[in-house]
Image: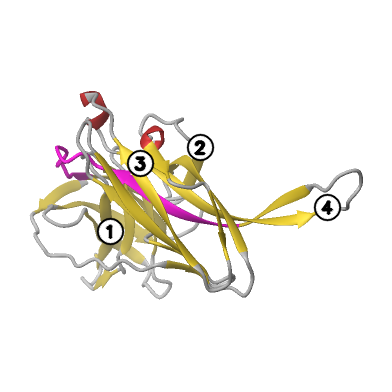
Protein backbone atom coordinates (compact mmCIF):
# COMPACT_ATOMS: atom_id res chain seq x y z
CA UNK A 1 0.00 0.00 0.00
CA UNK A 2 1.59 3.28 -1.10
CA UNK A 3 0.91 6.67 0.49
CA UNK A 4 0.89 10.03 -1.32
CA UNK A 5 0.70 13.66 -0.34
CA UNK A 6 -0.40 16.22 -2.97
CA UNK A 7 -0.21 20.01 -2.44
CA UNK A 8 -3.36 21.91 -3.31
CA UNK A 9 -4.65 25.44 -2.69
CA UNK A 10 -8.14 26.68 -3.50
CA UNK A 11 -10.63 29.31 -2.39
CA UNK A 12 -13.89 28.37 -0.71
CA UNK A 13 -17.10 30.35 -0.50
CA UNK A 14 -19.33 29.39 2.39
CA UNK A 15 -23.03 30.13 2.60
CA UNK A 16 -24.92 30.25 5.90
CA UNK A 17 -28.52 29.13 5.68
CA UNK A 18 -31.09 29.02 8.49
CA UNK A 19 -32.28 25.70 9.80
CA UNK A 20 -36.04 25.56 9.42
CA UNK A 21 -38.41 22.95 10.80
CA UNK A 22 -40.92 22.28 8.05
CA UNK A 23 -43.17 20.37 10.41
CA UNK A 24 -43.81 23.27 12.74
CA UNK A 25 -42.25 26.23 10.87
CA UNK A 26 -39.89 26.93 13.74
CA UNK A 27 -36.50 28.41 12.90
CA UNK A 28 -33.17 29.15 14.56
CA UNK A 29 -30.43 31.10 12.77
CA UNK A 30 -27.48 30.84 12.71
CA UNK A 31 -27.03 27.18 13.57
CA UNK A 32 -23.31 27.62 14.27
CA UNK A 33 -21.59 30.07 16.61
CA UNK A 34 -17.85 30.34 15.90
CA UNK A 35 -15.68 31.92 18.58
CA UNK A 36 -11.96 32.58 18.24
CA UNK A 37 -11.02 33.87 21.68
CA UNK A 38 -7.78 34.07 23.60
CA UNK A 39 -7.34 33.75 27.36
CA UNK A 40 -9.50 36.25 29.25
CA UNK A 41 -11.45 37.34 26.17
CA UNK A 42 -15.23 37.29 25.82
CA UNK A 43 -17.72 37.72 22.99
CA UNK A 44 -21.50 37.71 22.58
CA UNK A 45 -23.37 36.42 19.53
CA UNK A 46 -27.08 36.44 18.73
CA UNK A 47 -29.39 33.59 17.65
CA UNK A 48 -32.63 34.57 15.92
CA UNK A 49 -35.59 32.34 16.79
CA UNK A 50 -38.84 32.46 14.83
CA UNK A 51 -42.29 30.93 15.14
CA UNK A 52 -43.96 30.58 11.76
CA UNK A 53 -46.63 28.23 13.05
CA UNK A 54 -50.24 29.13 13.82
CA UNK A 55 -50.00 28.60 17.55
CA UNK A 56 -48.08 29.94 20.53
CA UNK A 57 -44.83 28.07 21.14
CA UNK A 58 -42.68 27.90 24.25
CA UNK A 59 -38.98 27.08 24.26
CA UNK A 60 -36.45 26.13 26.88
CA UNK A 61 -32.72 26.68 26.32
CA UNK A 62 -29.92 24.49 27.65
CA UNK A 63 -26.43 23.18 26.90
CA UNK A 64 -25.02 19.70 26.26
CA UNK A 65 -21.56 18.34 25.57
CA UNK A 66 -21.18 16.20 22.47
CA UNK A 67 -18.80 14.36 20.16
CA UNK A 68 -19.00 12.75 16.75
CA UNK A 69 -18.45 9.01 16.60
CA UNK A 70 -16.42 7.20 13.93
CA UNK A 71 -19.35 7.25 11.48
CA UNK A 72 -20.33 10.88 12.08
CA UNK A 73 -23.18 10.28 14.52
CA UNK A 74 -23.66 12.68 17.43
CA UNK A 75 -23.30 11.44 21.00
CA UNK A 76 -24.54 13.78 23.74
CA UNK A 77 -23.43 14.17 27.34
CA UNK A 78 -24.36 16.31 30.31
CA UNK A 79 -22.89 19.81 30.04
CA UNK A 80 -19.33 20.25 31.31
CA UNK A 81 -18.63 16.52 31.23
CA UNK A 82 -16.02 16.20 28.49
CA UNK A 83 -12.47 17.57 28.51
CA UNK A 84 -13.05 19.39 25.22
CA UNK A 85 -16.21 21.10 26.51
CA UNK A 86 -16.62 24.89 26.58
CA UNK A 87 -20.01 24.65 28.33
CA UNK A 88 -18.73 26.04 31.63
CA UNK A 89 -17.86 29.33 29.92
CA UNK A 90 -21.14 29.78 28.00
CA UNK A 91 -24.05 31.85 29.30
CA UNK A 92 -27.26 33.10 27.64
CA UNK A 93 -29.60 35.94 28.50
CA UNK A 94 -32.70 33.76 28.87
CA UNK A 95 -33.43 30.07 29.36
CA UNK A 96 -37.13 30.24 28.44
CA UNK A 97 -38.91 31.93 25.52
CA UNK A 98 -42.54 32.21 24.49
CA UNK A 99 -43.43 33.23 20.94
CA UNK A 100 -46.86 34.02 19.52
CA UNK A 101 -47.67 32.96 15.92
CA UNK A 102 -45.51 34.90 13.47
CA UNK A 103 -43.34 36.33 16.24
CA UNK A 104 -39.55 36.13 16.53
CA UNK A 105 -37.07 36.77 19.32
CA UNK A 106 -33.34 36.90 19.87
CA UNK A 107 -31.18 34.87 22.23
CA UNK A 108 -27.82 36.37 23.21
CA UNK A 109 -25.10 33.79 23.84
CA UNK A 110 -21.85 34.81 25.51
CA UNK A 111 -18.60 32.88 25.71
CA UNK A 112 -16.21 34.22 28.35
CA UNK A 113 -12.80 32.57 28.44
CA UNK A 114 -10.88 32.41 31.73
CA UNK A 115 -7.47 34.02 32.17
CA UNK A 116 -5.90 30.57 32.46
CA UNK A 117 -3.60 30.01 29.43
CA UNK A 118 -4.27 26.26 29.63
CA UNK A 119 -7.89 26.94 28.58
CA UNK A 120 -6.75 28.02 25.11
CA UNK A 121 -4.32 25.24 24.33
CA UNK A 122 -6.92 23.27 22.37
CA UNK A 123 -10.18 23.67 20.48
CA UNK A 124 -13.34 23.21 22.54
CA UNK A 125 -17.04 22.96 21.70
CA UNK A 126 -20.59 22.49 23.02
CA UNK A 127 -24.18 22.24 21.74
CA UNK A 128 -26.93 24.70 22.62
CA UNK A 129 -30.43 23.27 22.35
CA UNK A 130 -33.58 25.33 21.83
CA UNK A 131 -36.33 22.89 22.69
CA UNK A 132 -40.08 23.35 22.42
CA UNK A 133 -42.28 22.44 25.34
CA UNK A 134 -46.05 22.30 25.67
CA UNK A 135 -47.84 23.22 28.85
CA UNK A 136 -51.11 21.41 29.38
CA UNK A 137 -53.35 21.90 32.37
CA UNK A 138 -53.90 18.59 34.10
CA UNK A 139 -57.21 17.62 35.58
CA UNK A 140 -57.94 19.94 38.44
CA UNK A 141 -58.13 18.18 41.73
CA UNK A 142 -56.95 19.84 44.89
CA UNK A 143 -54.81 22.20 42.79
CA UNK A 144 -53.97 22.96 39.17
CA UNK A 145 -50.80 21.33 37.90
CA UNK A 146 -48.89 21.61 34.61
CA UNK A 147 -47.34 18.74 32.71
CA UNK A 148 -44.53 19.37 30.23
CA UNK A 149 -44.00 17.34 27.05
CA UNK A 150 -40.97 17.76 24.79
CA UNK A 151 -41.86 18.29 21.14
CA UNK A 152 -38.91 19.44 19.03
CA UNK A 153 -35.38 20.70 19.57
CA UNK A 154 -33.07 22.74 17.37
CA UNK A 155 -29.33 22.37 17.91
CA UNK A 156 -26.86 25.25 17.60
CA UNK A 157 -23.19 24.24 17.41
CA UNK A 158 -20.78 26.28 19.53
CA UNK A 159 -17.11 26.15 18.53
CA UNK A 160 -14.24 27.86 20.36
CA UNK A 161 -10.99 27.82 18.36
CA UNK A 162 -8.17 29.83 20.00
CA UNK A 163 -6.48 32.11 17.44
CA UNK A 164 -3.08 30.61 18.27
CA UNK A 165 -4.13 27.24 16.84
CA UNK A 166 -3.37 26.83 13.14
CA UNK A 167 -2.17 23.27 12.51
CA UNK A 168 -4.30 21.54 9.86
CA UNK A 169 -3.54 17.94 9.01
CA UNK A 170 -5.51 14.87 7.96
CA UNK A 171 -4.08 11.37 7.65
CA UNK A 172 -5.44 8.48 5.60
CA UNK A 173 -4.83 5.39 7.71
CA UNK A 174 -6.30 2.53 5.69
CA UNK A 175 -8.87 1.30 3.18
CA UNK A 176 -10.62 -1.85 4.41
CA UNK A 177 -13.58 -3.98 3.27
CA UNK A 178 -16.78 -3.32 5.18
CA UNK A 179 -18.09 -6.18 7.30
CA UNK A 180 -21.64 -5.01 6.65
CA UNK A 181 -21.94 -5.41 2.87
CA UNK A 182 -20.23 -6.86 -0.20
CA UNK A 183 -18.29 -4.46 -2.48
CA UNK A 184 -18.33 -1.78 0.21
CA UNK A 185 -15.18 -0.23 1.68
CA UNK A 186 -14.31 1.99 4.62
CA UNK A 187 -11.70 4.69 4.19
CA UNK A 188 -10.21 5.34 7.63
CA UNK A 189 -9.01 8.90 8.22
CA UNK A 190 -7.87 10.91 11.23
CA UNK A 191 -7.63 14.61 11.98
CA UNK A 192 -4.13 14.98 13.45
CA UNK A 193 -4.20 18.79 13.53
CA UNK A 194 -5.41 21.36 16.08
CA UNK A 195 -8.63 22.59 14.46
CA UNK A 196 -11.84 21.13 13.05
CA UNK A 197 -11.70 20.19 9.38
CA UNK A 198 -14.36 20.05 6.68
CA UNK A 199 -13.14 17.08 4.68
CA UNK A 200 -14.03 15.47 1.38
CA UNK A 201 -13.01 11.99 0.26
CA UNK A 202 -13.38 9.95 -2.91
CA UNK A 203 -12.16 6.73 -4.53
CA UNK A 204 -10.67 6.40 -8.01
CA UNK A 205 -10.56 2.87 -9.42
CA UNK A 206 -8.51 1.56 -12.35
CA UNK A 207 -9.28 -1.87 -13.78
CA UNK A 208 -6.23 -4.14 -13.86
CA UNK A 209 -7.79 -5.93 -16.82
CA UNK A 210 -8.32 -3.08 -19.27
CA UNK A 211 -7.31 0.14 -17.47
CA UNK A 212 -10.86 1.54 -17.38
CA UNK A 213 -11.20 4.22 -14.73
CA UNK A 214 -14.13 4.88 -12.39
CA UNK A 215 -14.29 7.77 -9.92
CA UNK A 216 -16.82 7.63 -7.09
CA UNK A 217 -18.67 10.74 -6.01
CA UNK A 218 -16.97 12.56 -3.11
CA UNK A 219 -18.35 12.31 0.41
CA UNK A 220 -18.12 15.38 2.65
CA UNK A 221 -17.75 15.17 6.43
CA UNK A 222 -16.41 17.23 9.36
CA UNK A 223 -13.77 15.98 11.80
CA UNK A 224 -12.84 17.31 15.23
CA UNK A 225 -9.15 17.42 16.26
CA UNK A 226 -7.97 13.93 17.09
CA UNK A 227 -11.10 12.30 15.66
CA UNK A 228 -10.88 9.11 13.60
CA UNK A 229 -13.51 8.72 10.89
CA UNK A 230 -14.74 5.77 8.79
CA UNK A 231 -16.01 6.97 5.40
CA UNK A 232 -18.07 4.28 3.68
CA UNK A 233 -18.03 3.85 -0.10
CA UNK A 234 -20.29 1.43 -1.98
CA UNK A 235 -18.87 0.42 -5.35
CA UNK A 236 -21.18 0.94 -8.36
CA UNK A 237 -23.42 -2.08 -8.97
CA UNK A 238 -22.62 -2.03 -12.68
CA UNK A 239 -18.86 -2.18 -12.09
CA UNK A 240 -17.35 -5.14 -13.95
CA UNK A 241 -16.09 -7.98 -11.80
CA UNK A 242 -12.36 -8.26 -11.38
CA UNK A 243 -9.39 -6.65 -9.66
CA UNK A 244 -8.86 -2.90 -9.42
CA UNK A 245 -6.17 -0.53 -8.30
CA UNK A 246 -7.76 2.05 -5.98
CA UNK A 247 -6.56 5.52 -5.10
CA UNK A 248 -8.31 6.67 -1.90
CA UNK A 249 -8.10 10.43 -1.34
CA UNK A 250 -8.85 12.68 1.65
CA UNK A 251 -9.08 16.43 1.07
CA UNK A 252 -8.88 18.37 4.33
CA UNK A 253 -9.85 21.71 2.87
CA UNK A 254 -8.36 25.05 1.95
CA UNK A 255 -4.58 25.53 2.00
CA UNK A 256 -3.95 21.85 2.74
CA UNK A 257 -2.37 19.00 0.85
CA UNK A 258 -4.35 16.03 -0.36
CA UNK A 259 -3.66 12.81 1.50
CA UNK A 260 -4.02 9.51 -0.36
CA UNK A 261 -3.17 5.83 -0.31
CA UNK A 262 -3.19 3.24 -3.09
CA UNK A 263 -4.56 -0.26 -2.61
CA UNK A 264 -6.13 -3.12 -4.54
CA UNK A 265 -9.68 -4.43 -4.32
CA UNK A 266 -11.59 -7.20 -6.03
CA UNK A 267 -15.14 -6.73 -7.24
CA UNK A 268 -17.12 -9.94 -6.84
The residue tagged 1 is 201
Residue 63 vs 151, above or below: the answer is: above
* Mark 2 or mark 4, whichever is nearer to me: 4
Q: Secondary structure at mark 3?
A: strand
First to last magenta residue range: 152-170
Measured from the top left, where is residue 179 in percent x and y? Answer: 48, 49
Q: Residue lying at the far right in this picture: please name it.
A: 141
* Mark 1 or mark 3, whichever is nearer to me: 3
Measured from the top left, where is residue 66 in percent x and y? Answer: 44, 41
Chain-order first, disc 1 or disc 4: 4
Chain-order first, disc 1 or disc 3: 3
Task: State the CA–CA distance, disc 1 to disc 3.
Answer: 24 Å
Residue 186: mark in rendering:
none
* Mark 1 or mark 4, whichever is nearer to me: 4
Task: State the CA–CA distance, disc 2 to disc 1.
Answer: 29 Å
Residue 252 is covered by the magenta coloring: no
Measured from the top left, where is residue 194 in percent x and y? Answer: 21, 39
Q: Local crowd at mark 2 within 10 Å, few (<14), some, or many (≥20)?
A: some
The residue tagged 2 is 77
Q: Is residue 52 left or right of residue 108?
A: right
Residue 125: mark in rendering:
3
In the image, 23 versus 131, the foreground residue is 131
Amino acid sequence: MRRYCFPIVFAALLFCLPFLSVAQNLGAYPTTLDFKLGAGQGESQVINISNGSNKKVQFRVYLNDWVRDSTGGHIYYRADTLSRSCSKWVTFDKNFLELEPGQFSQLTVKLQMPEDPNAVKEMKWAMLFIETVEEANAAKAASTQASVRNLLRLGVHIYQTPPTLSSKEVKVLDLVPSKEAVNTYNLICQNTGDVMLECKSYLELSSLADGAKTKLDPIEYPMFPGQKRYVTFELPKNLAKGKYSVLAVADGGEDMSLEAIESQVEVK
